[in-house]
Every structure is written in C-alpha cells, then in structure tokens.
Image (cartoon, helix red, strand yellow):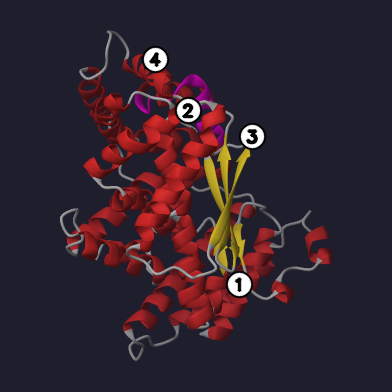
Amino acid sequence: MNSIAERYVKLVLGLGVYDPDYVDAYYGPEEWKPSGGDAAKKEEFPFSKFDDEVEQLMASLDGADPSPLTPIEKLRWSSMLKQLTAVKAKIVLLSGKSLSFDEESRLLYDAVAPVHSEDHYKVLLDELGRLLPGNGDVSPRLEKYKQSFIIRKEKLDGVFKAAIAEGRRRTMKHIELPSNERFTVEYVNNKPWSGYNWYKGNSFSVIQVNTDLPIFIDRAIDLACHEGYPGHHVYNLLMEKDLFRERGWKEFSVYPLFSPQSLIAEGSANFGIEVALPGEERVLYEREVLFPIAGFDPLRAHEYYGIQSVKAKLDHAGNEAARNYLDGKWKKDAAVDWLVTYALFSPERAAQRVQFIERYRSYVINYNLGQDMVRAYIEKRGGTVNNADLRWKLFEDLLSEPHTPSDLLK
C-alpha cells in the first residue's frame, strides 16, 4: 500500500502543475515535487501519461483483498480508491472534456446534491419575510436589515481574533492539539472566496480573510471556527499528525482540493461551528463578547440570530445556481439573479459567488451537503447537542481517520 501511496502523491503533485488550485496542501518530501523543468512543460497536458498511471494504481487496489485489514486499514483502502477515482476525473477535466454538474460532483466528491424546486425556496422566503421589518422582496429587506451589523474595518481584527480564541479554547477542552500548533491571520483582497485556510504543515496555518465586501457579525464566528478551530486548521493538523506522521501513511502528506477529502473537510468545518458553539451558547457568547467589541447593541443578538437560523435553510440554493449555470441551462445573469433572490446575496456578493462557481465548479456542494452529511453521521451515532462529550469524540474521530463521503451514509 505504501508504494501505491507514494505514486499517488507524485501523481497529485504532477497534476498540480496544470492546475494551481489542485494541491491545497503538501508537507511531504521536497524531492517528490515536480522539478522546474516539469513545471515548464505545462503547455501540453499529457493525458495518456497521467491516465495510464491512475489506471495502474486503481487496478492494483482493485486486485487487492482488503478482508485481512484492520478496520482503520480498510478505511484507508476505500479512501485511496475514492481519491484515485477523483484523480481520474480530474485528469479527464484537465484534458478539456466536460462532465455534468452532478456527474462531476459524484466522481470528484463521492456525493450528489439533492435538487430542490423553486417552490421549496419560496416557502422558506415567506417564513423569513415574516421575521423581517418592512414589506416587499425579502432579499433587499434582509440586506437593509444587516447593514446595521457590518463590522467596521478598524474593529475587524479584534472581533476576528476574539472569535478564533474562543473557538480554540472550546476545541482544546475536547481535542488534544500539538504543543506547536499555531496560525497567522491575514486580510486580503481580490479573491473569489470570503476566507481560506492555507495549511503549511508542522501544525501551522495561514488564515486569510477577504475584505472585498462588507463582513457581517455572524461571519466572525463562522470564519474563525470554519477556517480555524475546530475546522480546517484542526482537520489538517490531525491528518498530518495521526495519519502521516504517526502511521506513516504517505498519501496524507498531500491534500488534493478536488477530491472526496474536501467534502469531509468543508462539511466538518461548517458543522464544527455548531459543535463549538451550539445554539444558545453562540448567541450568549456573541451578545456578551463579540457584539460589544464590534460596537453593536448586545440586546439585538437574539433577534439577529433568529433571522440567521431561518436564512440558513436557504443554503442549498447556491447549488441550484451552480448546477444550472455550469450545465449551460442558465446564463451568468440568471445565476446572479437566482443567488440574489433565493440565496439572499447582495448583487455584489452574488457576482463574487458566480466567480467562485466558475473557478471551483461543483465544489460548492461540499459546504452545505457536506455539513448535512457530517451532522447526520454524528447524530446517528448519538453525538447530539445534548451529549456534547460524545459529539466532540465522534467529531475528532471523523477528522483523524480516513473516512469517505460514502462512509457517512452507512
């Protein structure tokens, strides 16, 4: 298995030459990286070379008998097979061929997002509209309401660092982190995403926050927990520590972004917000700490998060925009309009989201569908909000073992 793993890592790194977004993190041997000469040859994509290699690796795994393996070794085996399936799909896409939105997500992320009708979202809009002041279309009313909760730029760093510190404090009560784990925060512009964790290895992350558009108060905890604790930073360092360093499983020295690993990563990062600050605990913390730091009236916290909890039911609306736009059924303007109407984005934020869709394509399902799948997996095993210790234990196990999205459905 280790020889297959080494070839897999080199294959992923080689594909990264042809797509700069593909390798999200790598902390393995420096000599495994493609040479400068290899990088210079990126003008022509060598489809046959890569396709032959992935076919050989998949045949080697298919021909092996996993029955003598331990439970975690079986997880490793099935994880590698799913990752290689995604690599093969990425090779097809890099060769210039196209796949439908659902087929692409099935091959890359081992999951397909459900389709919801427009009427489904209209019912949710009506529910939200009853909570908002004013009359008329919900999207502009929500945008107007939220203007009072934009974090001023001079307050942003203080609010964000306080949120990260709280996420870290709560995480460390349940998950033992390496003594050398650390991060830095950077504020950036001109990105298609609102936040990103660049994991550098050796338990270190660079967390970037995009300040192109206004940042509302709810994004502080969302980004702090999603990108930091117990989200991406914790996920990556546990993978490195438990699987790559301690077990010597070489495939976990690299993280290909367009792979089933991302559904686990994004889904757990989103669900991790709920794990760290469930329900009323979040509102209480925001009211007592973040609202005062941001200069907002703490008495409005309950009202604000009551509205946010209903708005969250519309999260899957972005999948419909991506599916129809990428499948050629909608033009860009139609996708933007849908995002404004049903995902309740401002026109500027909707345009930014379409940029994200154009760049990352079916990746969008990993956030909402991934969160739903991770939540269902943990709650099915007893990790409910009323059993916090078990919830944290199952969450840590998920982050430190090589599960696939298919595993979450078992």
Q: CA distance from mark 4 to mark 3?
A: 24 Å
Q: CA distance from mark 3 to mark 2?
A: 16 Å
Q: Can you give x and y, in whole percent of width and height, for residue 384 in the image?
A: 18, 56
Kind of residue sitting beneath label 1: Val
Q: Secondary structure at mark 3?
A: loop
Q: Sort mark 4 into few (<14), some (14-19) or many (20+) by Cα contacts within 10 Å.
A: some
- Stretch of the chain drawn in magenta: 342-355
- The quadrant holding residue 44 is bottom right
Circle 3 sits on which residue?
Answer: 189
Q: Can you give x and y, in whole percent of width and height, for residue 358 in the image?
A: 56, 38
Q: Secondary structure at mark 1?
A: helix
Q: Is residue 214 visible?
A: yes
Q: Secondary structure at mark 4?
A: helix
Residue in the image at 43% along x and 33% along y: 293
Circle 4 sits on which residue?
Answer: 144
Q: Sort mark 2 into few (<14), some (14-19) or many (20+) by Cα contacts within 10 Å.
A: many
- The quadrant holding residue 221 is top left
The tag earlier along the polypeptide, 1 or 3, is: 1
Kind of residue sitting beneath label 2: Ile
Q: Secondary structure at mark 2?
A: loop
Q: Can you give x and y, in whole percent of width and height, for residue 286 in the image?
A: 33, 37
